[in-house]
Image (cartoon, coloured by chain):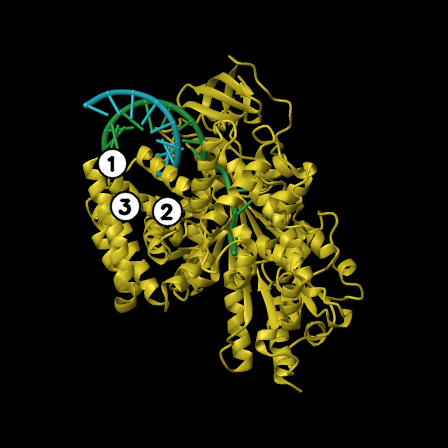
Chain colours: A yellow, B green, C cyan
Amino acid sequence: MSDYLTRLNPEQRAAVETVDGPLLVLAGAGTGKTRVLTTRFAHILMSRRAFPNQVLAVTFTNKAAKEMRERVASILGQPAEGLWLGTFHALCARMLRRHAELVGLTSNFTILDTDDQMRLLKQIMAAENIDTKRWTPQNLMGAIQRWKDRGLTPDRVTDAEDVDFANGRARGLYAQYQERLKAVNAADFGDLLLHVTEILRTRPDVLANYHRMFRYILVDEYQDTNTVQYLWLRLLAQRENPAERNICCVGDDDQSIYSWRGAEIENILRFEKDFPGATIVRLEANYRSTRPILGAAAGLIAQNNGRLGKTLRPGRNDAEGDPVSVISLWDSEEEARMVGERIEQAQRRRHKLSEIAILVRTGSQTRAFEERLITLGIPYRVVGGQKFYERSEIRDAMAYLRVVNQPADDLAFERIVNQPKRGLGDTAIRAMHELGRREGKPLVSAAWRMIETGALRAKAKQSLHELLEGFARWRAQLPAEGHVVVAATMLEESGYTDMWKQDKSPEAAGRLENLKELLRALGEFETLAGFLEHVALVMETDENAEADRVSLMTLHAAKGLEFDMVFLPGWEEGLFPHQRALDESGDKGLEEERRLAYVGITRARQKAIISHAANRRIYANWSSAVPSRFLDELPEEHVLREGGAGAHRTRMANQPSAFAGQFPLVSRKPRVIEAGAWEVAQRPARTASMPVGQRVFHQKFGYGRVMAVDDSKLDVEFEHAGRKRVIDTFVEKA
DNA sequence: GGGAAATTTTTTTTT
DNA sequence: AAAATTTCCC
């Protein structure tokens, strides 16, 4: 028997060996989901059921795609090339380049970044005289994205799916936006899927081609598919002969955390209806975490309704371990200190930093931990965050490259035409647009014409002329010099690097470094077009992943990863579960937040440390924070509640010490933050609103007077701490 | 048109 | 508190 099969448990083997017919694998966290997918992929190839290019394998993230590629290669013992393996978007981009003309594009179409999209929408809205104070471009962008997520081209948006925007004009604006995209030969992210799905459903010949080609389909993280992705998959999988519907979807309804991006948990729940006779395999043996971690996670997720129902059981018999720690702290700074100390402790015990992660709910939380880790000299890496290719200097440089690659890329040209300053402001650019539209030519042509017509001031005219000649020259140099040399020359000659060299701001040096890094990255690609495609779809650089560093990232970014020791800070009402999730999606939102908590806990192999702070700084002000309801939902037998430094802080509260000078701590009713405190702490019961003018007392700020009331939030002028915004349930009448 | 100054917003999660 | 955006003035 093949060696790679013997390393699987019976459930996993069933999932790998059931190659024919539809298969749904419900794989709990840490049950070897990736191993099953990759082994299955390899098994299909090794058993000669299909050639490598006859298997379609879809993932959600580039990280997952990369990992799958590597693991398949390692089982096969050779590089896995020519595979249709990638994210939905990457695969669709590849397909769309083959059939671009069917939706009115050419195969070298540009993939827009979000800046470009916004700029385009703003232009359209301005032309339509829409009040952008009341109806923001962001709102419209969101609506368009949601439509695209559901596979709705403008003509398919029905009244029922319309949104309240600018007196019902959203659909029309959407149609215009799509027209403009076509005119500049561009597709946004959503279009990649939307266009391909549209092609597949209107062109049976094209679809039949793909049916012939893809004999096996593998889908990772199926619970996160949105409607258009679902339609795309269904079109490709629903072959005429039901016996040939070889689609295998792997997912976990308990880890569905992307509904805000249009993911429909329904997709996984109705798999059996879409594919009658589907086999369902459950993977429930967890090989990752200790018994208390699994117990805590299970207790939490059990609070959700409408689950497909899986029970994780420890797959290892040595899975005993420490209980999950729940630590209560005074404020977010103390929380960061606690995490830092524990990491130092672990470091002293020779734990690898790369096996430690801090997982936060929102990106903004990373900062406090970064500062602490820097102070302590602990190396760390922030995963995700502000991405390299989203930095403005990188996007500018990319825009230069895009114009070289495709002169008709209006959006790129517009971005850099006055960057560095060339004396071309709003008026000039608007005139350029006007001219271009009238003649049906790209902006670059319009710019040439404007130089001839003399509609510009001398200075602007000259510098624009230089830029245009520059582009012609750089483009001509491309074949002989290569894209790296041309890119470097271009950034020099256009004055772009000079602009940053002369910039006195502290970030300027870093930006110049980033530009060098960009040139280095560019060198790793054979062609300029290849590089641009990569950046548009991958958006990240994979640098020094091997170094021994603590990982710092959002819970979303952590999905699919695992660490020995995981910190889960900020478990407070409003932050986690996040207020916006509750406000916008109610119970559904709460359940998704709970799944996110479940994802967080199950990332840990050995030790999970959950914490919450009683006070947290929001924007510039301190606010009180109630412990998250999720803390109550953790089963007591798997949890150790610790007071953290709260106890010692309380003892000092009688003497003005820790916060002396900042906030004189008036200890009228010292609140002990320690084990058990969350049981006493009230939820924000809707009773407390205070009248304006009421004198109040607050634990952290002392005495003050209510100046304004906004629902549950009060603006209070404190006697010592100044004006703060606090939640009404955290002050009492004085 | 460009820069400085004043004002407003920011913090949900991402391919 | 910092960043982004708008307004103001030359």
A66 horizontally vs A480: left or right: right
Residue position for label 2: A371
Quick check: do tags 1 and 3 share a chain?
A: yes
Could you say where residue A567 lies in the image, as x and y percent from the top left?
A: 51, 52
Q: Which mark is residue A507?
A: 3
Kindly identify the amino acid type of the residue bearing the numbered disc 3: Glu
Classify mark 1: helix, strand or loop.
loop
Tag on residue A63? none
Mark 1: which amino acid? Leu
Question: Compared to A530, does A126 lie above or below?
Answer: above
Question: What's the chain of the residue with tag 3?
Answer: A
User: Are discs 3 and 2 located on one and the same chain?
Assistant: yes
Q: Nearer the viewer, mark 1 or mark 3?
A: 1
For the residues labelled 1 and 2, the Cα–Cα distance comes to: 50 Å
Q: Position of residue A352 (x, y in %)?
A: 44, 64
Q: Secondary structure at mark 3?
A: loop
Please report the residue visible at 26 percent of the width from the left and 39 percent of the height from the top. A453
Q: Residue furthest bottom?
A: A1
* Amino acid type of the residue tagged 2 in the rendering: Glu
Of marks 1 and 2, the one in the foreground = 1
User: Mark 1 highlights which residue?
Assistant: A456
Question: Dot 3, how many residues are within 10 Å of its Cα: few (below 14), some (14-19), or many (20+)?
Answer: few
